[in-house]
Image (spheres, helix red, strand yellow):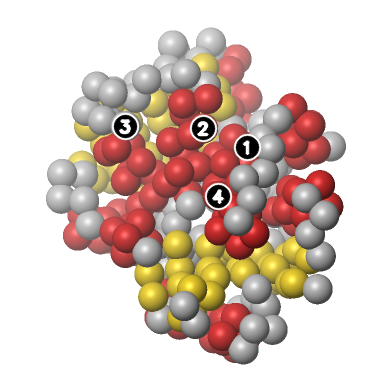
Amino acid sequence: MKKYFVIGNPINHSLSPRIHNFWIKKNNINAIYEKKKLSDDDLENLILKIKKKEIDGINVTVPFKKKVISYLENLTDEAKLTESVNTIFLDNDKITGHNTDIYGFISAFKSVKYDISGKKILILGAGGVVSSIIFALKKLKAKKIIISNRTRNKADSLKNLFKDLTVINWGDISEFDLVVNATSIGLKNEEELNLDFLKNQKDKFFYDVIYNPKETNFLKSAKKRGNMTENGKKMFIYQAAASFKIWHGIEPAIDDEISELLDQ
C-alpha cells in the first residue's frame, strides 16, 4: 500500500486527508493519506523516507513550505521561483519539491470569474504561501501588489523575489480592490484581524486563504458591509488535485461532491 502525508504544525484543521482519501477510493488506488504534526527536528528523517520509498508523497503546509527546501535534491521551476514547496515526490530517484499553490490560486479565481488584471491587491501576511500568491497575481496581471505583515522584515524579504512589491507597515491604510488574508488569524473561530481601516471598506473583494472554518470573522464582517467574499476552499481543492495528478498520474474529478465533502 502506498503512503502519503500532509505535514504541518498545527495540522488538525487540515482537510487534505478527507479529499485525497476520497479520490484514492474513487480511483481504486491502493493507498492511504494521513496528517502528521511535526517539529522542525522531524523534517529531515520524514523526507528521507521518500528516498527509501517508505513514503510515496508529502504535502507541506504551515510552517514548513520554505523549511523543507534544504532537505530536497531537486526543485521544479515554480518551487525555485517562489522558494516555496507544498508537494514532495520522487522523480528520477531524486527527492523533488514542487509548488501547486500557484495553480490552485489561479484556478480558484478563474472559477469565481473575478478578473484580477489592472487591480490593486493588498496581501496581509508574509508566510509560506504568500510568494505563491504574489507569483499567481503577477501571472494574472495585477496592477499593484501591496504587502503588510506584523513582522515587517519578513515582508521586506519578499522584495528579494519580487522587486516591484510595495511593503507597508502593519495597520497602515492602503487602497485596494482585493484584500487577501494570508495570515493564520482565523484558524480559531474567536480570532479576528483587528485592522480598523478594513472595517470601512465596501464593494471590494475580501479573500481568505483559510478554508476551515469556512467563514472566518474576516469574511463575516466584510460580507455584512456588502463586500464580495471567498474562502480558500477552491484554491485548496485545485492545489490538491495538482498534487494528486503528480503522484498518481490521474486528474481527479472536481465537482459538487468534492465541495460538499469539505463542508461536512
Q: Earlier in the sequence, mark 1 or mark 4?
A: 1
Which residue is the site of mark 1? 233
The x, y position of residue 241, in whole percent, is 61, 47
Circle nearer the viewer, 3 or 4: 4
Q: Earlier in the sequence, mark 3 or mark 4?
A: 3
Circle nearer the viewer, 1 or 3: 3
Which residue is the site of mark 4? 242
Q: Secondary structure at mark 3?
A: loop
Q: Secondary structure at mark 4?
A: helix
The x, y position of residue 206, in whole percent, is 48, 26
Residue type, numbered disc 2: Ala
Callouts 1 and 3 close, C-beta under 8 Å? no
Instruction: Name the residue rendered at 51%, 61% in the picture.
Output: 86
Distance between the alpha carbons at the discs numbered 3 and 4: 19 Å
Is residue 23 found left or right of 114 in the rendered image?
Answer: right
Instruction: Name the residue rendered at 21%, 51% in the picture.
Output: 162
Based on the displayed image, in which of its 4 quarters is residue 117 positioned? Answer: top left
Task: Give the position of the N terminus as an image quadrant.
Answer: bottom right
Based on the displayed image, in which of its 4 quarters is residue 205 positioned? Answer: top left
Residue type, numbered disc 4: Ala
Residue type, numbered disc 3: Leu
